[in-house]
Image: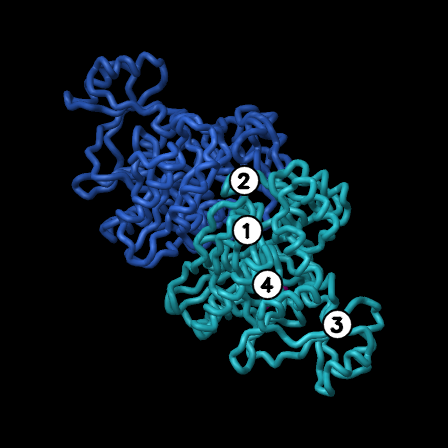
Chain colours: A cyan, B blue
Amino acid sequence: MVGGGQLARMTAQAAIGLGVTFRVLAGSAADSAALVTHDVAVGSHLSLPDVAAFAAGCDVVTFDHEHVPGAVLTVLESSGVLVRPGPAALRFTQDKLAMRERLAELGVPCPRYAPVSSVADVVSFTGGCWPVVLKAVSGGYDGKGVWVCSSPAEAAEVLGHGIALLAEEFVPFRRELAALVARSPSGQGAAYPVVQTVQVDGICREVIAPAPGLDPELAELAQARALRVAAALGVTGLLAVELFETTSSGLLVNELAMRPHNSGHWTIEGARTSQFEQHLRAVLDLPLGSASAVSPPGSVTVMANLLGGTDPDIYDRYIHVMAGDPAVKVHSYGKEARLGRKIGHVTVVGAPGEDVAAVRDRARRAASYLRWGKDDGD
Amino acid sequence: MVGGGQLARMTAQAAIGLGVTFRVLAGSAADSAALVTHDVAVGSHLSLPDVAAFAAGCDVVTFDHEHVPGAVLTVLESSGVLVRPGPAALRFTQDKLAMRERLAELGVPCPRYAPVSSVADVVSFTGGCWPVVLKAVSGGYDGKGVWVCSSPAEAAEVLGHGIALLAEEFVPFRRELAALVARSPSGQGAAYPVVQTVQVDGICREVIAPAPGLDPELAELAQARALRVAAALGVTGLLAVELFETTSSGLLVNELAMRPHNSGHWTIEGARTSQFEQHLRAVLDLPLGSASAVSPPGSVTVMANLLGGTDPDIYDRYIHVMAGDPAVKVHSYGKEARLGRKIGHVTVVGAPGEDVAAVRDRARRAASYLRWGKDDGD
């Protein structure tokens, strides 16, 4: 796996269970996954020599992020390395304009969009109706590279960065959803229950699985659409489709990711097969595991991200959190706690019949206490 | 953790989640845990210099087996190392006579026993009623060091080994059970549901959690007794109490283990807190996790051990097993498949209302296929 972040770290845990030899290309020996993986190579994911040397020892190469240049992957692939997902699929996560165009071709509903290179372009796109969303065509993640602009002046500021931009309509959504599916090279697909994600400042803070009160037909539509996109784009491994549920109960695709995804961390405890094991099974072309939730119908699993606070060490707070709720699961990524950085997550599998609000509260309290040493409602 | 077997390997997975730095002292770099752990020391658990050098880098030392000599541990402990469980507790797993005497003092029902050093001792112990069980006072595990003798001649053969022996009555049991509990240095205890274990030739083949049809009062008694023994013996970490359920619905203690135990592998998927995380929490004096089963009342989780067959590689068989039952969980220990050796296990969490026999059948089929490449009823 290229990339040494928390996704690689959690994939390493799944690889141990499967008895699959797992190797990580990390940018630094202090990376989250590098701290716990037996077989670590340190190098740059941007460097063809580094990636090629790493790949030489692997049966299959996969990723914990989308930032390996397409040119590097194309060389690898043409030299016979199994790259999963391959560059032809990954391109649609690296180039948001290509993604929008391909989804439009497939008839998949998306927010209205247009490439823009001047304030005049943006003003013309809005038709006078603000705000508008500007997105970096490439390189964005976790809210980086996304700007909500309320005026031509704000748009001008973003245009001043000098990067390729896309304008998208500002969607008045009811909530955000995510559909996570897996697809193997043999073409087998598996779909997890559709979840609700709660984002603050573009960063995922909470995931509720399955999405409470979601119309079953809409859930099925989201799953079917994600599977169709995975097949059409030739995805191998996981595909996470971030969606807006509009105020008129429509579904619009916001973003795509082709790797384990924050919206799927709940599956470690909450699904029969974790997304990390599923990704390994998919890229190894093994039969996919059951993606169904372990909790009975009507109950939910809630994942809350743990963001860094002002104290670099969360371990001292384990005592309070574990004593307060013995069934909460703490996942630490071994990362230094910088303010606002994702350094871990907590998961609560609701008891049968337990109220959604109560499960959310348990997860939120645990994450908040780990972050701040108190329950501050954050 | 001293010892590089599968218990250390699975504890390593739990340590990653907790963000706890985990170090293993393995006998060889090819040991099950050494293959996947970032921080591996290679050395002998019998050597004071090796163990002391290893311990120097650890906040707490714990074990995946009971074979570190008491003298080594006593030196460590007196030099200020936190050894959990400590030598005073571990002694009762290393010396079965001491264990029996201590349990007798505590009023814990055990099979009738006596130390024996001659055929005359054995004949006298039996009172003419055969068979009788002879056990090595130290060093036995997985059926090794246990002999069922049906005649004085058979007893004489065992006595010929020249090791310290204990005679125990042959208990006509209904079935075997195990009670797994955790105890922290602060004195907190947690008890997992009592399970049924199915042994063949002294090796655990299958675990059903919770034990089907077990009288709830008997289950409670087993848990309470295990917690009482853990406290009385000063155990820190896990204590597994292997029990006979007698034909008259009594409970007799067969063996004790103070570490993660084969009878607790089902907890990885089947309980809120896996035994491996629980052991870490206990030895680190963190609050213990919920030990309750994830499956609703009336349904079970079944774990079947995967023993080595004649093919050294099981990976090729993953396809069949995973395609046949997408919800079966395969755990491979990365060990070479020698005939009869424990090289992995499979777990099936039963669906609500699923018949115990059906869940057992799913687990047995998967393990059998992985072992032999066919379902041979083994």
Residue B351 locus on image (x, y percent) = 34, 56
Element class at badge 1:
helix
**Does the magenta-highlighted stretch encompass residue B351?**
no
Name the mark nearer the viewer: 3 or 1. Answer: 3
User: What residue is shown with label 1?
Assistant: A279
Which of A233/A319 is in front? A233
Q: Earlier in the sequence, mark 3 or mark 1?
A: 3
Residue position marked by numbered label 3 in the rendering: A115
Identify the residue position indicated by label 4 in the image: A305
- Whole-angstrom CA distance, mark 2 to mark 1, is 12 Å
Q: Nearer the viewer, residue A222 or A65?
A: A222
Which dot marks residue A269? none
Q: Does mark 1 fall on the same chain as mark 2? A: yes
**Residue B292: x percent and y percent?**
38, 55
| Residue range of the region highlighted in magenta in the rendering | A370-374
Kindly identify which residue carries mark 2: A20
Residues at discs 4 and 2 in contact (Cβ within 8 Å): no
Position of the N terminus of chain B by quadrant: top right
* 3 and 4 marks on the same chain: yes
Q: Measure the C-alpha gap from mark 3 to mark 4.
A: 33 Å
Does any portion of residue B63 appear in the rendered image?
Answer: yes
N-terminal-most mark, 1 or 4: 1
Q: How crowded is mark 1: few (under 14 residues within 10 Å), some or many (20 or more)?
A: many
Q: Is residue B172 above or below residue A240?
A: above
Q: Is residue A373 magenta?
A: yes
Question: Is residue B291 positioned above or below A348 on the image?
Answer: above
Q: Residue at x 33, y 40 (%)?
A: B364
